[in-house]
Each structure stands twice: as C-alpha cells, then as structure tokens.
Image: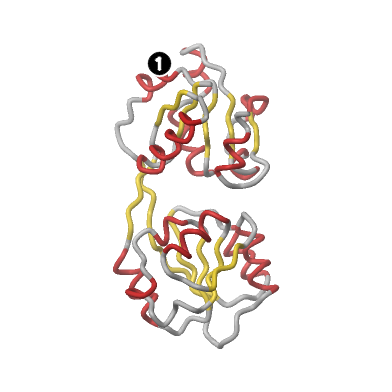
Amino acid sequence: MRVLVTRPQEKAERTCARLAAMGHEAFSLPLFRPVHFDDVVKAALAARHWRALAVTSAEALENVEASRDAPGFRDLPVFAVGRKTADAARAAGFTQVIDGGGDGERLAETIAAFPPSGDGPLLYLAGDPRAPFFEEALRRLDVAFETVTAYAMRPVADLPVDAVLEEARPEAVLLYSAAAAARFFALVPAQLLARHGLNPLFLCLSAKVAASVPACLSASVRIAGAPDEEGLLALLN
C-alpha cells in the first residue's frame, strides 16, 4: 500500500522505514517541526519542589538526561501517557515510570488513583499546541499541577503539497494528532484530493484525531485500536 506519513521529519523517517519493512511504499509530508525549550525544562526540573512529573509526549523529554538535569528527580514518579512516552522517560534515566494507559484523561485518572506522596504540585511538561483534556481532567480530579511548555510544534512552511500528492498518490494517510489532522485538511481539502483522483483511507491515532477529519470524508476514516503507532500501523494489515 502507498502510505503518506504526516509526522515531523525525523520521526517520519523512522516510520517510513517501518512501513518499508512491512512491504509498503512510504512517503512523508512533515506538517510540523519541533522546537525544544531546553533551558526552560532544565530550570523547571531543577526547582525540585515537585512531587511527580507528567508527560504526554516523548517530545517533552527529547533532550533530558535525568542524572544531569534532574538528579533530585530521578527516583520520583514519572507519569507517562503511553508506552512510547514511558520508554522515553526510562531512556532519559528516570527510574519510577508509570504508563498512564494511552490518552490524557486516562493518565489523569491514573495519577488521581495512585497519588504520589509529598506536598508539592505535579510538574506537567507539555507541548504547544496541545489538547486541553489532560489538564481539564486534572482539575476535575483535584490534582494540583503546574504546566511548563517544553516544546512547540511549528508549522513547516512552503510545503510542496501538490507535488507530494502526485508523487505519493497515497492509498492511506497516517494522522497522529488533532493538530496534524486539522492542518492536513487545511492544506489538502477534499476538492484537492478529488482533483488528483485520490480516495485514501485516513488512519487516525484516536477518536479525537478522527474528529478533525471533514465529515464528507468520514467513510474513509479508520481509528487505531490502541492509541500508539503499533495500533495505527495495524490498520494497514
């Protein structure tokens, strides 16, 4: 199958390699690029008045080494949104990592069900833009927290959309976030797909991502059984 990957470039390359190993033809259209605020993250971690850390994307820990940046934090609980983010936290050197189950609301429920000890708030290393669901759930569950923006996803300018569509002629498009889905369809409306004679499947990481697909294309939407890349790629089988 011909598959279009909409992740940032570095991650898209890894996904394209996985797709090629699965026997698919992979193409990339990186809609965003990450900008990391390393000094802000290190300053927040060094404050050491937190009782736990929460992360909803591995991107938030991209340049973090616990032993160097947060020695007082290494053994405190780190609540990660899912398996990939939990793996990134362990790779960064944190020793007490809890997998929150796959989405922000379940992560908040996990934190409330197993509250870490101590008096300080939870530190949430977040991205920009981000969905509000995790923070809303923390407030609803009366979990004290502070948010620090660890990275921002900036739109990639001057994307050669028509050329990519013509080369790739995708039979499936991988959509990993609501922001990526919204930008994809701003750049690639249904009329443009029709002009290129394309009718791809839109493979979405979650129902929240699928909600950003235009209603006129809803019949082509498939939602991953689990909100991770393994679940997404399983839709290609």
For label 1, count other residues whose C-alpha is less than 10 Å away and answer few (under 14), some (14-19) or many (20+): few
- Looking at the picture, does residue 74 appear above or below residue 12? below
Identified at 39% across, 42% down, the residue is 8
Please provide percent x and percent y for residue 154.
Answer: 35, 47
**Identity of the amino acid at label 1?**
Glu
Position of residue 210 measured from the top left corner of the image (x, y, whole percent): 61, 38
Q: How many marks?
A: 1
Query: The C terminus lies in which quarter of the figure?
Result: top right
Residue visible at 65% across and 46% down in the picture: 226
| Horizontal and vertical percent position of residue 225 | 68, 42
Residue found at the far front of this picture: 21
Does 127 sit left or right of 140 as displayed? left
Horizontal side of 38 relative to 61 (left or right) equals left
Residue 14 in the image: above or below residue 144: above
Colour setup of the view: secondary structure
Q: Is residue 6 above or below residue 108?
A: above
Quadrant hosting residue 38:
bottom left
Q: Is residue 156 left or right of residue 79?
A: left
Q: Which residue is mark 1?
A: 166
In the image, what residue occupies the spot 30% across and 36% down?
Answer: 157
Picture quadrant where residue 16 is located? top left
Question: Which residue is farthest right?
Answer: 113
Horizontal and vertical percent position of residue 198: 52, 16
Q: Secondary structure at mark 1?
A: helix
| Residue nearest the viewer, comparing 78 with 124 | 78
